[in-house]
Image: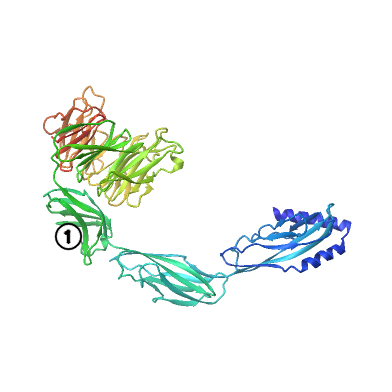
């Protein structure tokens, strides 16, 4: 627009100058003064820094000059690589600033003409002057791609060589040389099979880049390929990652003293080990082991005394990297007790390693109860808008979700809490995008044995099957939205198996009902099932062979209905609170109406669509009201039941 305005002004002034005649003497004086200024020239490297602006100085002494206009000659346009000229000053001398704006043009010489016009108050042209502007774009040495990444799984294969194409952006031929600068490690990068290389830019040169890091420890290494030619240098950064088989988690990570058990070992690089040997501590080999895939091994361990055992996957190079421990502890011997408390019980976790109970309270806190050998010490960690929590597979962290009511600026967080110190170590922004938080809040969390937490959302202000579910990696602290089969949930609820092998996800509402989904920790996949059923509650047993959909319906791992637990007691409006035992196929229920604990054997159908009760009903150590959470200790010997007034610890019937 500005160049058009300059051209139009120049045309108007020129037409009036023809009608009224030229003042030739003044024109000559203008020309003599301006002739002493040299044409402006700019130079820059292709795609490099834009050169600084330059100026013309226009000096004139005629008293009749009322207008000074700068633009381009009629019939031409201002080139896109040049900003519209600017004028500084209202009278002689006037400075005209010429400013290039890019270096992305084709290499070569680019030129244009700048026209300056003076005129009287009646717009009669006094004089005009053209000045040339040239802009030289220099071709430079160019490398494609601009960076390289090599990823090696040790023991599998060396990464393939990658090619870098070297040329001049202006297609000029000259010699180039390439060398290596190491930021970490040394001698692991090869250029055409050696430490340096050279060639010509026309035709483009091909640089073969390869890695040879057998002498390096596992880790991430950095180097820079420095390529020089025609007085210029381009750098190509190189990243080389060497990955050794590593154990991240063991699930369950707690075992019983002097009792053999099975562990699911999660990590990476297990396929690379040609002769796997799982070790629990320095001197204890697994009794059996099966490599399921590159990230999972299932192993049995022998009876072990109490202690902490680092879990390794060993090959010919020795013990591989691990961050996981198997913790062997005695069965709890807590006396039966009722502990006064306040706040609804959203969920309950028993931490066998630390002999601690955590309750997610509706008061906006995690309440902790630690057994000191004779009594329980209580403390709390405030967490406003707490919605749920889960223990990581290694027991090192409690991961909680907090969520304000849906609004445009709702705060949603994933909170990491050190289980040993009971302090917040990190607060991560929640997975729901900010532009959707006026619709969705976080509702439920469950932990898979690969360290991925499945987080469900809900929408209390709207209806429909579109409430998202997310996978949150507790190591990288990043989230991924999971894709539903057909359509999603309305107000999702999730629960994990005791060994973390599977997370079941259901929707509380929606018409038609949404498919029940599950997250498979072995494959990292989120899958739809043939079960279309809404439910406000879900609970999974130790090894994911059975789960409760709602408070009563029992399904197997193929999502076939096995039978139903009893519904509310006669006269009661509330379902019984269930908890799976880690032993056998037993499940406990507690009725706040009759204040009775019952035990059912899910391997023993009663022939009427239900299951046989084991023994008689048992009263709790202290009666509890509604809103309970109930769990069974890892050895099957203790029940933990909480409501909004007390926590009961007692022997499991």
- Looking at the picture, does residue 421 appear above or below residue 248? above
Is residue 589 something one can see in this rendering? yes
Q: In the image, 261: left or right of 124?
A: left
Pointer 1 local density, CA inside 10 Å: few below 14, some 14–19, many at least 20: few
Q: In the image, 616: left or right of 50?
A: left
* Residue at 80 percent of width and 58 percent of height: 118
Helix, strand or loop for disc 1: loop
* Residue at 81 percent of width and 64 percent of height: 30
Is residue 606 something one can see in this rendering? no
- Looking at the picture, does residue 513 appear above or below residue 293? above
Q: Position of residue 48 (x, y in %)?
A: 56, 65
- Looking at the picture, does residue 633 appear above or below residue 48? above
Q: Which residue is mark 1?
A: 282
Question: Image quadrant of residue 266?
Answer: bottom left
Q: Position of residue 139 (x, y in %)?
A: 57, 70
Question: Image quadrant of residue 237?
Answer: bottom left
Quadrant where the C terminus is found in the figure: top left
């Amino acid at each position: 627009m500005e160049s058009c305005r300059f051209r139009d002004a120049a045309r108007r002034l020129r037409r009036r100058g023809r009608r009224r005649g030229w003042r030739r003497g003044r024109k000559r004086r203008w020309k003599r003064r301006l002739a002493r200024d040299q044409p402006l020239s700019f130079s820059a490297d292709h795609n490099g820094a834009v050169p600084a602006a330059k100026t013309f100085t226009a000096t004139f002494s005629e008293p009749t000059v009322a207008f000074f206009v700068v633009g381009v000659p009629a019939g031409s346009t201002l080139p896109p690589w040049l900003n519209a000229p600017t004028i500084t000053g209202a009278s002689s001398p006037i400075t005209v600033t010429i400013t290039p704006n890019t270096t992305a043009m084709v290499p070569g010489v680019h030129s244009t003409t700048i026209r300056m016009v003076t005129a009287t108050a009646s717009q009669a042209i006094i004089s005009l002057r053209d000045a040339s502007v040239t802009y030289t774009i220099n071709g430079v040495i160019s490398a494609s791609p601009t960076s390289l990444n090599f990823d090696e799984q040790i023991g599998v294969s060396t990464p393939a060589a990658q090619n870098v194409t070297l040329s001049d952006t202006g297609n000029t031929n000259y010699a180039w040389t390439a060398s290596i600068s190491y930021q970490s490690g040394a001698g692991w990068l090869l250029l055409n099979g050696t430490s340096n290389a050279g060639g010509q830019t026309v035709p483009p040169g091909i640089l073969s880049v390869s890695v040879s890091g057998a002498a390096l420890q596992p880790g991430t290494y950095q180097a820079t390929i420095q390529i020089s030619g025609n007085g210029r240098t381009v750098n190509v950064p190189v990243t080389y990652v060497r990955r050794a088989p590593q154990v991240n988690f063991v699930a369950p990570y707690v075992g019983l003293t002097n009792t053999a058990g099975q562990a699911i070992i999660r990590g990476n690089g297990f396929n690379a080990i040609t002769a796997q040997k799982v070790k629990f501590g320095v001197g204890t080999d697994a009794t059996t082991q099966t490599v399921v895939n590159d990230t999972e091994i299932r192993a049995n361990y022998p009876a072990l005394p109490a202690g902490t055992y680092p879990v390794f996957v060993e090959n010919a190079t020795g013990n591989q990297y691990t961050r996981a421990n198997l913790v062997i502890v005695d069965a709890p011997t807590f006396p039966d007790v009722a502990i006064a408390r306040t706040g609804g019980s959203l969920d309950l976790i028993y931490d066998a390693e630390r002999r601690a109970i955590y309750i997610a309270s509706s008061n906006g806190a995690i309440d902790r109860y630690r057994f000191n050998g004779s009594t329980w010490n209580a403390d709390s960690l405030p967490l406003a808008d707490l919605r749920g929590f889960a223990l990581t597979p290694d027991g090192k962290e409690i991961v909680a979700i907090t969520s304000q009511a849906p609004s445009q600026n709702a705060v949603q967080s994933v909170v990491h809490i050190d289980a040993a110190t009971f302090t917040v170590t990190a607060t991560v922004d929640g997975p729901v995008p900010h532009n959707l938080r006026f619709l969705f809040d976080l509702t439920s969390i469950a932990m898979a044995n690969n360290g991925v937490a499945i987080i469900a959302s809900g929408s209390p202000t709207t209806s429909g099957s579109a409430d998202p579910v997310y996978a949150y990696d507790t190591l990288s602290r990043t989230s991924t939205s999971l894709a539903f089969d057909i359509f999603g949930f309305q107000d999702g609820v999730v629960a994990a198996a005791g060994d973390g092998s599977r997370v079941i996800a259901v929707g509380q509402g929606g018409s038609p009902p949404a498919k029940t989904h599950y997250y498979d920790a072995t494959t990292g996949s989120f899958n739809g099932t043939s079960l279309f059923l809404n439910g406000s509650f879900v609970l999974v047993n130790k090894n994911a062979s059975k789960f409760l959909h709602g408070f009563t319906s029992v399904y197997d791992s193929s999502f076939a209905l096995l039978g139903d637990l009893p519904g509310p007691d006669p006269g009661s409006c509330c379902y019984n609170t269930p908890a799976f035992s880690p032993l056998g196929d037993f499940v406990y229920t507690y009725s706040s109406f009759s204040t009775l604990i019952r035990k059912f054997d899910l391997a023993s159908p009663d022939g009427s669509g239900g299951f046989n009760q084991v023994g008689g009903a048992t009263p709790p150590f202290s009666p509890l009201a509604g809103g309970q959470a109930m769990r069974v200790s890892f050895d099957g010997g203790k029940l933990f039941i909480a409501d909004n007034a007390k926590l009961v610890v007692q022997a499991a019937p």
